[in-house]
Image (cartoon, helix red, strand yellow):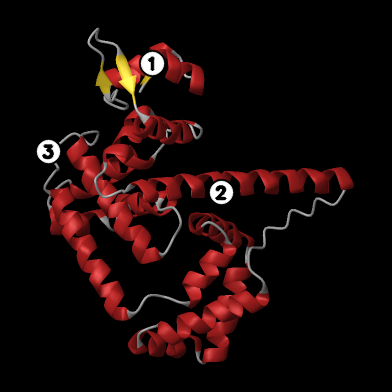
Amino acid sequence: MRSVKEISDLTGISVRTLHYYDEIGLLKPTEKSGAGYRLYDDKALETLQQILFFREFDIPLKEIKAVMDNPVLKRNQILQMQRNMLIAKKERMERLISSIDDILKGENKMDFAVFSKTEMEEMFQTMFEHMPANMRNLAVKEFGSIEEWKKHYMEALSSEEMQKGYAKVVEWYGGKENFLSAANNPVSKEVAESYNKRVEVVLQKLSAKKECDTASFEVKEVVGEYGFVMKQLSQIKSEKGLMLAQAQYYRNEKIKPIIDEKYGEGASEFFVKAIEAFYENK
């Protein structure tokens, strides 16, 4: 067992901060001595390390607590999440350094391309092969032929706007290779249907919490489960970007009435607030 002073000396975290973490329930001491002093074991020290990883990204303490307390997320899942966040941060830093090097060399070309022509062709082929037959036939009818459809797809995907959009999606997957692997190896129809049923159950649970504060544990627990299911379905490294995009989907004026009709008046706005409260840095 280590005293709060020893933990402070070991980690560089002030005694006052450790006391505050105890007060808000983020890091409770393992036990207290007969004299009432806080004592911490190795497991508590590991928990503190996980908290400090999240703080490295300026994530609010209440959101860290929601993640740490979420029974859906196990120890290794939290560590993997933090590892992916650190890798993404490292890759962003490397891209920035590379851009600065290019500018110093006078080679700043502002190239927004994410995928090569070959990669885009493979993406089209995978989409074509896995698309339901009725949708595929409608697309072919609209464009006149598969070749014209492919040409349109390639031109649209090659645009700067689309490449920028895909750059964000690639980041969710933890890199282009991971994205292409998921895109070229989609889950089966049966698996997708199974996940969609799980999503429906989660949304029903979330809609039942409409009268609760979005900052409450019971709401965050359901949102955490929602994010976990979406992460598994989409085969992404971190679901934060996807979930925030999903919140924007619920905010869409054409979608709101559909969601409200299915899950009850005000459900769409509640879903937005609940997801943003869980994932957005404030």
The quadrant of the picture occupied by the N terminus is top left
Which tag is nearer the camera, tag 1 or tag 3? 1
Q: Would you say residue 270 is visible in this rendering?
A: no
Evaluate whether residue 57 shows in this view.
yes
**As drawn, 112 above or below 25:** below
Q: CA distance from mark 3 to mark 2?
A: 36 Å
Neighbourhood count class around disc 1 (C-alpha, 10 Å): few under 14, some 14–19, many 20 upward: many
Circle 3 sits in a helix, a strand or a loop, which is it? Answer: loop
Which of the two discs, 2 and 1, labels the residue nearer the N terminus?
A: 1
* Residue at numbered disc 2: 88
In this rendering, the answer to whether 148 lies above or below 120 is below
Residue 90 vs residue 47, the one in the foreground: 47
The answer to whether 164 appears left or right of 232 in the picture is right
Q: In the rendered image, which quarter is residue 35 located in? A: top left
Provide residue 167's location: percent of width, then percent of height.
57, 57
| Amino acid identity at mark 2 | Ala
Between label 2 and label 1, give the one nearer the viewer. 1
Question: Is residue 164 rendered to the left or right of residue 219?
Answer: right
Residue 262, disc: none
- Write down the residue under mark 1: 4
Q: State the residue position of label 3.
A: 211
Query: In terms of secondary structure, where does tag 1 sit?
Result: helix
